[in-house]
Image: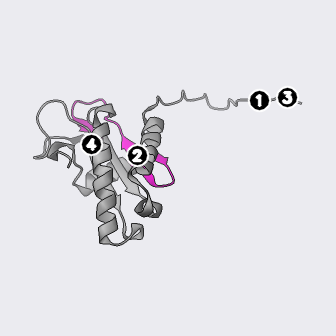
Amino acid sequence: MLPPENRLRRRQDFAIAVKRGRRAGRPLLVVHLRREDGAAGQVDGYSDSHPHVAEGTPSARAGFVVSKAVGPAVVRNLVKRRLRHLVRERLGRLPAGSLIVVRALPPAGTASYLDLAHDLDAALKRLLRPDPAPQPAGSRTVTGSGR
């Protein structure tokens, strides 16, 4: 179970993470990560001063989306429990104040715990690596002999 200060509950929080965050897709799940914008305790102007967030440094918060396409209620709840446990173990790797949304895809319903862990780790590895340096407008990377 995730502690209350690490849970995403509001629609606005899910929307910020999904619409403005980076995304990494894997065969079993899609992970959206929105990092804190640098203002103390704020993600896109949203203050963390609501009842589920402790005072001081904001912690990373996670939410889960598991649709009916994944399977019947028993399967969906199993997938959610597995994902909550996996994310709880990895919260320390996430930047303080970040928002993460994990969306299970239909194949997640038949996947093992280890398969979900592998896909989550791969997605987080991709999302947590530094952003590539932006290229100046009009420049192109040319490979090959140029003929």
Please say whether residue 35 is one of the residues in the magenta stretch. Answer: yes
* Mark identifier at residue 88: 4
Residue located at (42% from left, 39% from top)? 124
Per the image, the residue denoted by label 2 is 117
Within-10-Å neighbours for mark 4: few <14, some 14–19, many 20+? some
Q: What residue type is disc 4 on?
A: Arg
Numbered disc 1: secondary structure: loop
Is the C terminus in the top left, top right, bottom left or bottom right quadrant? top right
| Relative image position of residue 137 (x, y in whole percent) | 62, 31
Magenta span: 19-45
Q: Is residue 133 left or right of residue 137?
A: left
Per the image, the residue denoted by label 1 is 143
Mark 1 or mark 4: name the one nearer the start of the chain: 4
Mark 2 or mark 1: name the one nearer the start of the chain: 2
Please say whether residue 137 is one of the residues in the magenta stretch. Answer: no
Establish if 33 lies above or below 147: below
Q: Is residue 95 visible?
A: no
Q: Is residue 41 visible?
A: yes
Residue located at (28% from left, 32% from top)? 92
Establish if 103 lies above or below 124: below
* Mark identifier at residue 33: none
Within-10-Å neighbours for mark 3: few <14, some 14–19, many 20+? few
Question: Is label 2 or label 3 in front?
Answer: 2
Q: What residue type is disc 1 on?
A: Thr
